[in-house]
Image: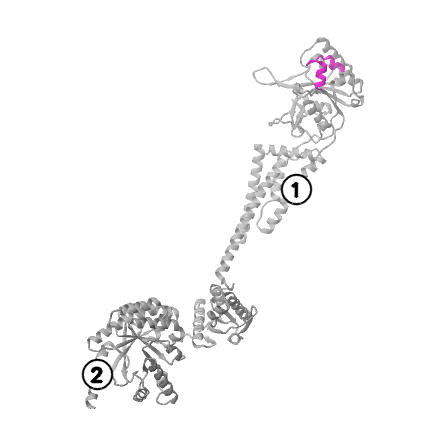
């Protein structure tokens, strides 16, 4: 895979280099870089300047000269006089940038020819190429008159002009073989080779520094001979009205005579600037692109930025240095384009890298959020399950356990110290667990529950860790506050290789729930003691189906009035006969229904069934009070309470709702409100299982109940234990003083019945009277009981 990635990156690099090379080649071929190159060359002229050689002096046909002559063109005798004066002052060569192709006054032409012949070969006359009169549009060379040029040298004064109208180049000559004509500057500089190529004019030599004289002064011989002696003299027009002007990139508008003079200065000083061939420039651009190529890696990109900076400085400084050392004008524009394309390439690569980095950071952030609790920053349940799955894939010989650590009374503590401090407490406990278990992994499973994965090489080491956890000191200091944090532990051991992470964690949570219910410090999950949660859900699904399929029914256990032996009430107890499993005890599904939220549906069905069964009993002559148990979880459900009130409204219901004592103690406010609503709807209310919990007598005075049921645990020993008799007696007396009747549960012997009757108990319920029986058997039982009662009265 890494090899394929390497090949892909190499291909991308080659592709990028190819794109840069093609783009540079197209830019060079189409000429789009010419303006940029010209601008850079102009800037280099500012940076690389050289003094003029003072080997040439320009004689200007300026405005004063024209005014002195009074006309133009003037007589050529004036040029003859100027030649004579210049040669007399020691001029080496006298050259003209003046048109002598047309005839003038014969005498003046003769005088000029005579002056030229005085020193043959020291006067240079101009030629120039211009369009001819023929229809083919060919150019023709215009030369001086034969009489003038016979003893003179000829040189071309044509100046190449670029497409933008500026003069940047100068030619060595024009034409080939017999038609070759040397340029004026080349002729003045004695360039022997017949070259017709061009060179770049070095405008680093300033035109203003070239020595010059006015033609009128030369004509009148009013000049310093030192300005002429040993020098080349070039005579040309500078007056504006003569129109011999050219635009230049550096010096502005320059007269033609100075263009030739500047070109001569370049040639004389060896500063005729040459540009490398296009293929060399292209090769340099490709080499530069290879140096600046983009490769993968943030470190490489940082190094590339430094290279770009170095190359940028080099492309600005190196051409200036080269031009200063040698007459070479390096073409920089293609190199800059190559760098710019590589910079764009690198920028895109950097943006892609940053985009990927942002995506990776975002994914990492999302993964961190998905795997951690936002309030405490600890790994969450999902993270623990992932780590547990990894641990389960290790050696099967290792001892592995998952521990659910619950913080006791966490909501109360959080209400007392606040959310921030309670989160600090959770983190502090997690840190202590991590320290204690060393390589154990700790996670935040829920608000008050932490999870710890323990994996040790043998069960003894695992047991030692569990003992250390069980012996944790509850005292700790968090943010300067002393806090006692009591922990409960639920432990689930891996017992087989087919156990999954979710199941182990669920088992540890079930063990923690049991530890909290039984108020034990540590409970280990026992598969035989706890039902599988998935089976519980399936059981609830089957229970709902069984409610409408007639599998569930109510059995009734009679309540006997102790004073007269009359049965005036029954308690409705639910029974389930499963078509496959057979009889399912209530303890197996009622608790599950409470945990899963199905208890409301079951209770509402029970109330409907009890009302219907009571109607049947009443029709048969048995008007009984039917008691129905109400789960503690339903007392705070206002919708349920309203449903019960609506259900019995306007009916001869004869119902009594039994509410456990523990429900009253756990949530006295909800229990008080619910009892008040039930009483307002005409329902009887009974406090069930009194004596199982804390038996708080203070709650009894707050409850407007009709009945108090004493639990079997206080009844079974009432004949043998003086203490139990005292408790039962005081309870009966307290209940009577509060206006409540007292029912004793679990009465199984006549002796217990007799004792309870003497203690003032109002009614009894237990196997002494009857076991819970179905509705079909209850009617005959009541009839028989009534007959036996009547027979007993007659016998008496």
- Element on which disc 1 rests: helix
Identify the mark at residue 313; answer none if there is no mark: 1
Lateral position of residue 218 relative to residue 199, left or right: right
Q: Is residue 467 left or right of residue 784?
A: right
How many neighbours does mark 1 have within 10 angstroms: few (below 14), some (14-19), or many (20 or more)?
few
Q: Magenta segment range?
A: 61-81
**Which x, y percent locates residue 319?**
67, 37
Q: Note whether residue 546 is visible.
A: no
Answer above or below: position of 525 versus 171: below
SS label for mark 2: helix
For residue 65: magenta?
A: yes
Label 1, label 2: how many angstroms apart (C-alpha)?
118 Å
**Position of 408 relative to 327 (above/below):** below
Residue sitting at x 76%, y 28%:
53
For mark 2, what is the residue? 786
The answer to whether 109 appears left or right of 549 in the picture is right
The figure's colour scheme reads one colour
Above or below: residue 178 compared with residue 616: above
**Residue 796 % position (x, y):** 21, 91
Residue found at the far bottom of this picture? 796
Residue 299 image offset from top left, x and y in percent = 60, 51
The nearer-to-camera label among 1 and 2 is 2
């Amino acid at each position: 895979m890494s090899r394929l990635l390497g090949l892909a990156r190499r291909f991308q690099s080659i592709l990028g280099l190819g794109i840069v090379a093609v783009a540079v080649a197209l830019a060079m071929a189409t000429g789009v870089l010419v303006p940029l190159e010209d601008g850079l060359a102009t800037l280099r002229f500012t940076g690389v300047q050289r003094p003029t050689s003072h080997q040439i002096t320009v004689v200007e046909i300026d405005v004063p000269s024209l005014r002195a002559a009074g006309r133009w063109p003037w007589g050529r005798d004036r040029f003859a006089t100027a030649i004579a004066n210049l040669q007399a002052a020691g001029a080496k060569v006298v050259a003209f940038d003046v048109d002598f192709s047309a005839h003038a006054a014969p005498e003046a032409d003769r005088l000029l020819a005579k002056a030229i012949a005085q020193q043959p070969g020291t006067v240079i006359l101009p030629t120039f190429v211009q369009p001819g009169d023929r229809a083919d549009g060919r150019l023709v060379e215009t030369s001086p008159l034969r009489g003038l040029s016979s003893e003179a040298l000829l040189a071309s004064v044509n100046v190449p002009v670029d497409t933008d109208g500026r003069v940047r180049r100068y030619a060595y000559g024009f034409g080939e073989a017999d038609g070759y004509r040397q340029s004026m500057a080349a002729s003045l500089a004695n360039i022997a080779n017949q070259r017709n190529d061009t060179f770049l004019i070095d405008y680093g030599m300033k035109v203003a520094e070239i020595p010059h004289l006015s033609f009128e002064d030369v004509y009148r011989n009013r000049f310093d001979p030192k300005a002429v002696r040993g020098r080349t003299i070039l005579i040309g027009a500078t007056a504006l009205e003569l129109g011999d002007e050219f635009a230049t990139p550096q010096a502005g508008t320059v007269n033609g005579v100075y263009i030739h003079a500047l070109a001569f200065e370049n040639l004389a000083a060896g500063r005729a600037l040459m540009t490398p061939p296009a293929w060399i420039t292209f090769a340099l651009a490709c080499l530069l692109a290879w140096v600046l190529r983009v490769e993968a890696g943030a470190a490489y990109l940082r190094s590339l930025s430094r290279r770009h900076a170095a190359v940028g400085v080099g492309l600005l400084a190196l051409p200036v240095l080269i031009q200063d050392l040698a007459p070479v004008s390096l073409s920089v524009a293609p190199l800059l384009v190559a760098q710019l394309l590589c910079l764009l390439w690198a920028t895109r690569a950097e943006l892609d890298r940053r985009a990927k980095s942002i995506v990776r950071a975002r994914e990492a952030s999302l993964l961190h959020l998905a795997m951690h609790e936002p309030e405490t920053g600890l790994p969450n349940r999902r993270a623990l399950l992932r780590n547990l799955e990894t641990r389960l894939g290790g050696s099967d010989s290792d001892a592995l356990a998952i521990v659910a650590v619950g913080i006791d009374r966490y909501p109360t503590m959080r209400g007392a110290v606040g959310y921030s401090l309670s989160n600090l407490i959770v983190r502090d406990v997690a840190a202590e667990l991590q320290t204690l278990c060393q390589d154990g992994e700790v996670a935040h499973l829920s608000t008050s529950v932490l999870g710890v994965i323990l994996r040790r090489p043998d069960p003894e080491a695992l047991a030692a860790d569990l003992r250390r956890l069980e012996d944790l000191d509850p005292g700790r200091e968090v943010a300067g506050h002393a806090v006692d944090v009591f922990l409960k532990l639920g432990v689930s051991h891996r017992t087989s290789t087919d156990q999954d992470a979710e199941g182990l964690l669920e088992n540890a949570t079930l063990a923690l729930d049991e530890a909290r219910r039984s108020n034990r410090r540590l409970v280990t999950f026992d598969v035989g003691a706890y039902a599988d949660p998935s089976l519980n859900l399936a059981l609830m699904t089957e229970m709902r189906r069984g409610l409408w399929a007639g599998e569930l029914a109510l059995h009734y256990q009679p309540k006997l009035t102790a004073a007269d032996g009359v049965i005036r009430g029954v308690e409705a107890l639910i029974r389930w006969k499963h078509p496959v499993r057979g009889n399912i005890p209530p303890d197996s599904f009622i608790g599950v229904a409470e945990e899963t939220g199905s208890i409301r549906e079951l209770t509402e069905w029970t109330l409907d069934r009890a009302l219907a069964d009571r109607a049947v009993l009443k029709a048969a002559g048995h008007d009984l009070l039917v008691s129905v148990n109400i789960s503690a979880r339903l007392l705070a459900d206002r919708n349920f309470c309203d449903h019960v009130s609506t259900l019995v409204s306007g009916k001869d219901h004869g119902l009594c709702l039994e509410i456990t004592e523990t429900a009253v103690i756990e949530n006295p406010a909800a229990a008080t409100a619910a009892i008040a609503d039930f009483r307002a709807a005409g329902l009887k209310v009974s406090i069930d299982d009194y004596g199982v919990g804390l038996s708080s007598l203070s709650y009894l005075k707050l409850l407007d109940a009709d009945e108090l049921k004493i639990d079997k645990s206080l009844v079974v020993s009432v004949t043998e234990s003086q203490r139990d008799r005292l408790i039962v007696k005081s309870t009966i007396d307290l209940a009577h003083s509060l206006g409540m009747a007292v029912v004793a549960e679990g009465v199984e012997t006549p002796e217990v019945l007799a004792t309870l009757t003497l203690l003032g108990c109002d009614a009894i319920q237990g196997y002494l009277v009857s076991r819970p029986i179905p509705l079909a058997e209850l009617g005959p039982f009541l009839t028989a009981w009534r007959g036996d009662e009547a027979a007993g009265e007659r016998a008496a």
